[in-house]
Amino acid sequence: MSRPITQGVSCEVCNIQRAPGEIHPRESRLLKGTTLLICNKCEAGKKEPRSFIIIVARTKGFEAVSDYIKHERYVGKTIEAKEIIK
Ligand SMILES: [Zn+2]
């Protein structure tokens, strides 16, 4: 279920536009069945979109994403406890 890759694609993790060859579709590690367009840099860092980490933390608990938060495997401002706590 990959989407077609055209000119000037933005990585769905870091939101930076990359050349088509630098972006690849990959299934999210956190939200199974969701395909991400991810750049080589984010892939190398095993990163996931910040919003996915918050969603999973809220639904499955902090333990499910503790590694992502501890090692900052996302892009953007630091995820705060108040964003996770319901
Ligand atoms: Zn990226």
Image (cartoon, helix red, strand yellow):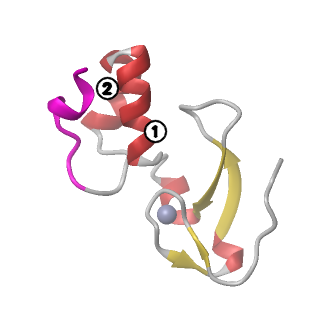
**Tag 2: amino acid:** Ser
Q: Nearer the viewer, mark 1 or mark 2?
A: 1
CA gap between label 1 and label 2 equals 13 Å
- Judge whether residue 46 is colored magenta: no
Q: Which mark is residue 52?
A: 1
Is residue 79 shown left or right of residue 68? left
Q: Residue furthest front?
A: 86
- Judge whether residue 83 is colored magenta: yes
> Which of the 4 image quarters holds residue 80?
top left
Q: Position of residue 71 (x, y in %)?
A: 29, 40
Is residue 49 shown left or right of residue 34? left
Image point (81%, 66%), residue name: 4
The mark nearer the N terminus, 1 or 2, is 1
Q: Main secondary structure of the magenta part?
A: loop
Secondary structure, mark 1, is helix
Where 52 sits versus 56, above or below? below
**Tag 1: amino acid:** Phe
Q: Position of residue 70 (x, y in %)?
A: 25, 34
Where 2 sits versus 39, above or below? above
Q: Which mark is residue 66?
A: 2
Q: Position of residue 67 (x, y in %)?
A: 35, 30
| Start-end of magenta stretch | 77-86
> Which of the 4 image quarters holds residue 85?
top left
Q: For the residue with label 1, is its CB less than 8 Å from the closest atom of ligand 1?
A: no
Q: Which mark is residue 86?
A: none
Where 15 sits versus 79, above or below? below
Image point (58%, 34%), residue name: 29
